[in-house]
Image (spheres, rainbow, N blue to C red):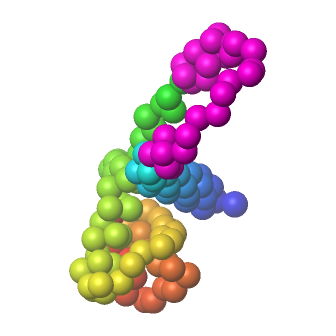
């Protein structure tokens, strides 16, 4: 396998990981918005008389102190240039949204090909020849 192909595969793998992270972040944000509604419903229910032994406060404190996920950035370097994978994703989303107004993006996959200076994308399982952005 040539060094260019090896580099392209590494770049593709890194971009996939960044897209996965972005999707997970979006899902967490959506879940956080739904969480207050569940708490409000739980508060509306009357409390039962507590016959339980005292809860262990140490266990609750450890759960609250979970470490936040570190901020991750993926950069693609090729032939002396550098571009952030996140910006490529944003360009692809903007390009698709501009061409397909009113369409919802449920899934998006990026295929970055630095050797041709393009990133191709597949939205909701469908792709086309014009589904690409310049790097």
Q: Which residues are magenta?
A: 38-66
Name the image quarter holding the N terminus.
bottom right
Name the side, left or right, on which 125 lies relative to 22.
right
Residue 28 appears anywhere in the view: no
Q: Within the magenta stretch, is there residue 78? A: no
Q: How far from the left and from the top, in percent, is residue 54?
A: 70, 13
Q: How far from the left and from the top, in percent, is residue 45?
A: 54, 44
Q: Quadrant of residue 102?
A: bottom left
Residue 63 appears anywhere in the view: yes
Q: How many numbered marks have been drawn onto this rendered protein structure? A: 0
Name the side, left or right, on which 134 lies relative to 111.
left
Q: Residue at x 42, y 41 (%)?
A: 73
Extreme residue toward the front, this view: 49
Q: Quadrant of residue 104?
A: bottom left
Q: How far from the left and from the top, in percent, is residue 85?
A: 41, 53
Q: Residue at x 43, y 34 (%)?
A: 71
Q: Residue at x 38, y 62 (%)?
A: 89
Q: Residue at x 55, y 81 (%)?
A: 125
Residue 11 or residue 86, whichever sits in front? 86
Q: Is residue 102 above or below residue 16?
A: below
Name the image quarter holding the C terminus.
bottom left
Q: Within the magenta stretch, is there residue 61? A: yes
Residue 68 or residue 99, whichever sits in front? 68
Residue 40 or residue 131, whichever sits in front? 40
Residue 43 or residue 92, whichever sits in front? 43
Q: Is residue 65 above or below residue 111?
A: above
């Amino acid at each position: 396998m040539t060094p260019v192909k090896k580099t392209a595969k590494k770049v593709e793998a890194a971009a996939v990981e960044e897209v996965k992270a972005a999707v997970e972040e979006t899902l967490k944000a959506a879940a956080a918005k739904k969480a207050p509604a569940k708490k409000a419903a739980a508060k509306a229910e009357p409390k039962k008389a507590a016959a339980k032994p005292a809860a262990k406060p140490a266990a609750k404190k450890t759960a609250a102190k979970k470490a936040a996920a570190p901020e991750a950035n993926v950069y693609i370097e090729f032939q002396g240039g550098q571009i952030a994978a996140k910006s490529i994703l944003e360009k692809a989303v903007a390009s698709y949204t501009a061409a397909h107004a009113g369409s919802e993006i449920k899934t998006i996959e990026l295929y970055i090909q630095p050797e041709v200076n393009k990133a191709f994308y597949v939205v909701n399982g469908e792709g086309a020849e014009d589904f690409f952005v310049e790097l």
